[in-house]
Amino acid sequence: MSEETRLREDICAMAKSLYDRGLTSGSSGNISARLSDGRLLVTPTGSSFGRLDPARLSLFDAGGKLTGGDKPTKEMPLHQAFYETRPAKTGAVVHLHSCHSVALSLLPDVDAENMLPPLTAYSIMRLGKVKLLPYFMPGDPAMGDAIRGLAGKRSAVMLAAHGPVVAGKDLEAAVYAIEELEETAKLAMLTRGANPTLLTRAQIDQIVRTFDVEWD
């Protein structure tokens, strides 16, 4: 099996897993993943994660030109910005409209520099600090500009009233990280107002040092 064939199948399998578990619904969400030669496979616009066809994924050449498949997601500016600003660390980008993440983004007292409270070690390990970005119209190229404005310092962002976007070293890492983001947002919503015990500054620092987390 070629690298491209395997990646096509992996994208569709992981997308269906996300869909089947309710982490995205309808035709929402999009995934891109980079081949070793720099080409990109991207989920098409208007497609459901539950019924993707590997043969119909959008294919871009290394220069960013669409060369095959269906019309790509309108959120390409988001994806392209991560590949441009974090080229050595981004092999895949996943964007969802997951419920608890979106709910948390709507609350008035969320820290825009780090929207997830330090509830678990794994959210810190897999995500670092999650930047809350303002609302943008879906498909607005300004979303890409907002990512570029971070100068490659964040692997995960949350678009207010829209959904999370996570870049990972490969498809599996990006999917696992965005799942962790949603689960942590769910914990934050469940414990909101209950004065939960958060990780201490010393505990956070230990995690950051031990697992070489981007945390500046």
Image (tube, grey):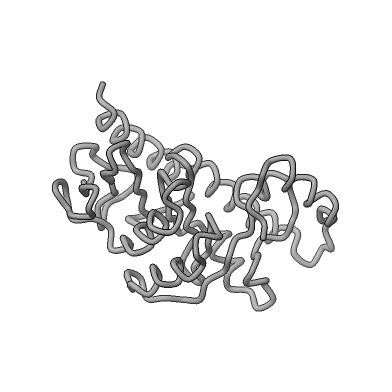
Say which quarter of the image contains residue 3: top left
Q: Residue furthest top?
A: 1
Percent position (x, y) of residue 48? 31, 50
- Comparing 198 with 91, the one in front is 91
Q: Residue at x 43, y 55 (%)?
A: 95
Vertical relation: 12 (above or below) 87: above
State whether residue 103 is above or below residue 41. Answer: below
Which quadrant would residue 210 be assigned to in this image?
A: top right
Q: Looking at the rendering, in which quadrant would you find the N terminus?
A: top left
Position of 138 compared to 193: left or right?
A: left
- Residue beneath the point at 64% across and 69% down: 113
Q: Which of the two residues, 102 or 113, is positioned nearer the viewer here?
A: 113
Residue placed at 31% from the left, 60% from the top?
A: 76
Where residue 27 appears, as percent x and y from the top left, is 32, 55
Percent coordinates x, y for residue 2 in the rendering? 25, 25
* Residue situated in front as seen by the camera: 72 or 194: 72
Q: Nearer the viewer, residue 196 or 174?
A: 174
Q: How many marks?
A: 0
